[in-house]
Image (cartoon, grey):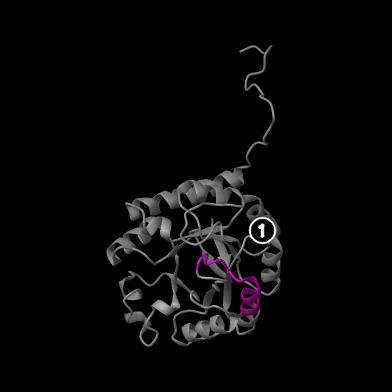
Amino acid sequence: MKWKIGGKPLTSRIFLGTGRFPSPLVQNQAIEASGAEVLTFAIRRVHLDAPHDDAILQHLEGDHFIYLPNTSGASNAEEAIRIARLARASGLSDWIKVEIHADQKTLLPDPVETLKATEALVKEGFVVLPYTSDDPALARKLEEAGAAAVMPGGSPIGTGLGLLNPYNLGLIAEELRVPVVVDAGIGSAADAVQAMELGADGVLINTAIARAKDPAAMAQAMKLAVEAGRLSRMAGRIPKKKYATASSPLGLGV
């Protein structure tokens, strides 16, 4: 079933990061196996004078992808805004993932600067998808600021620790009207299933696929996990109970 971000219809619910793959060939195999339509990359890694001849982008096969450049490396709102403007001026995309790190050790998002950058870039006409913490109050403020989707982290970038605070992520998915894409920390297919069962609209995955022993196989596993998690959420799980309930009650004939 299709869904939308910024008025753009999407089929896949996987956003795929393009960093850390061992080779362009492996990257393309993983992209194909994942079925991803949205590809994200750090703008600082792209040669903006000739983006389509860039070492990263020139190896992408087909022109049906939606590019989601990110502002990784920015330490404040002003830097993120400048990077976003450069990306749009180069013709890459008017979609932007605001990514502002509070410190280099944890790479956790700076909440104040992220909100400031989101407000400013929305006013400039960007389709803004901010990477944020798992704070429901901040997620609401980002939505109010005009974010096209909100991207809370499951755990710090590249750790593979999974969803450390599923309660908060579930609240965010429940309360927001814009799409919620769980970003960062997913390490296995089980994490992707859990994110979707909590109500997320999609997941962004990079390291778990790029650094897997077989990236293409992991990409396929993530695709199936996202589909299974979404279907499970829509089907409606049974409520958890303290005691057992017999599936075949006593006293009934067969």
Q: Nearer the viewer, residue 155 or 233?
A: 155
Tag 1: amino acid? Ile
Q: Nearer the viewer, residue 34 or 10?
A: 34
Picture quadrant where residue 238 is located: top right
Residue 180 on image: x %, y %: 60, 61
- Residue at screen point 40% across, 84% down: 48
Q: Which residue is mark 1?
A: 172
Residue 89 on image: x %, y %: 47, 88
Q: Is residue 103 magenta?
A: no
- Viewer can see residue 35: no
Q: Nearer the viewer, residue 155 or 151?
A: 155
- Residue at screen point 55% across, 78% down: 75
Residue 60 on image: x %, y %: 34, 70
The quarter in which the N terminus is drawn is bottom right
Q: Is residue 43 above or below residue 149?
A: below
- Residue at screen point 50% across, 57% down: 185
Q: Is residue 109 magenta?
A: yes
Q: Which residues are magenta?
A: 105-118
